[in-house]
Amino acid sequence: MNITNGNQQLKVIIETNLGPENKEWIASKLQKIIDTSSVRDLYMTYTLIGSKVKAITDFTAPETADEVYDYIKLQKGNLQQITRIYLLSEVLIAAPDVFIPKVANLMSIADTGELEAFLKFMILLPAAENYKDTAVDALRTNIATIFDAIALNNPYPANFFNHQQWNQMFLKAAFMERDLNQILAIDQMANKDLTRIISDYAHERWAASREIDPYFWRPVTNHLTDALLDDMMRLLQSKNKIENRAGALCCFYSKHKKAKILLAEYPELQQEIASGNTRWETLKK
């Protein structure tokens, strides 16, 4: 997922949904902040938006901002959060050298609710890679809402995390029992190191007689090795039908010849995938 012209789309959403008084207020505040490079006024305006703009989730979708609007709705964002992101976006465009470190500081002192909003919508900020430290720090939290904000339905990790950071996120999502199907770009971000980690983690869980989310195996698909074929066989022979499908999907989309031979022993599963009836997106349905 790549969001283009995020700032322009935000502006259209704000102009469509704020009342005349609030539009005039934020325009005047923005102009003053930009003209004076006032960090104090930026922080004050950011805070005052909490009392000026209602945190409503039911607002109008302008035709020219469908991409950003759809993302906001996916993340259950509200108008107050988006107005704050718009404010930051505008000052960052006007004077990046002045405001990039100040916005980073604002994120560092945010309360839980504000940090959640930052993580969900920092992808809409210009030069969003400047806030990667905040995103990576969020992976260390045990607060589910904060972790979910960066990990689930968010294109930021796939756009800016390296493989080590992305692997850490994926593994922790499994450990925290989050919905792995909501992690974006799994196929693109899958890598050999993650494949090894997945197998090692699975063996630890099996040894402790603990279950594993079958979706956890999706990154393995393009990196199957001879050593991992035993894992695939275990999934295919499981009494759990969802595990059967996960193993079959890994083998079906793999380029490993032995995986294809293994899957051929399960023609019904092979046919389900070939016909489109079984997909990763519908694995548990």
Image (cartoon, rainbow, N blue to C red):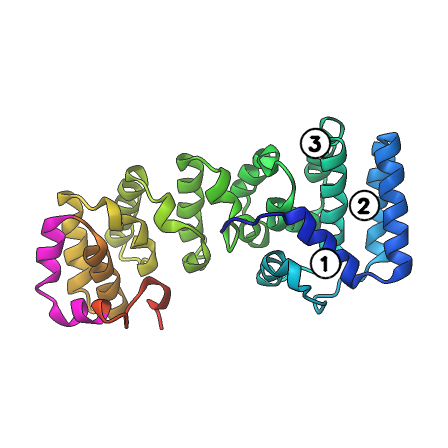
Q: Nearer the viewer, mark 3 or mark 1?
A: 1
The magenta-colored residue range is 256-272
Q: Secondary structure at mark 2?
A: helix
Query: Measured from the top left, where is residue 283 in percent x and y?
Result: 33, 67
Q: How many marks overall?
A: 3
154 sits to left or right of 46: left
Please, is residue 31 above or below residue 221 in the view? above
Q: Quadrant of residue 75?
A: bottom right
Residue 230 visible? The answer is yes
In the rendered image, residue 264 lying in the magenta stretch gets the answer yes
Q: Position of residue 203 (x, y in %)?
A: 24, 48
Between 145 and 119, which is closer to the camera in this rendering?
119
The quarter in which the C terminus is drawn is: bottom left
The numbered dot on residue 13 is 1
Q: Position of residue 176 (x, y in %)?
A: 45, 53
Q: Determine whether, in the image, residue 173 is placed left or right of residue 232.
A: right
Q: Main secondary structure of the magenta part?
A: helix
Q: CA distance from mark 2 to mark 3?
A: 15 Å
User: Which residue is pictured at 22% across the width and 71% down the height?
Assistant: 272
- Camera sees residue 203: no
Label ID, residue 46:
2
**Which is more N-terminal, label 1 or label 3?**
1
- Counting residues from the start of the chain, the first of labels 1 and 2 encountered is 1
Q: Is residue 117 above or below residue 197?
A: below
Disc 3 designates what residue? 100
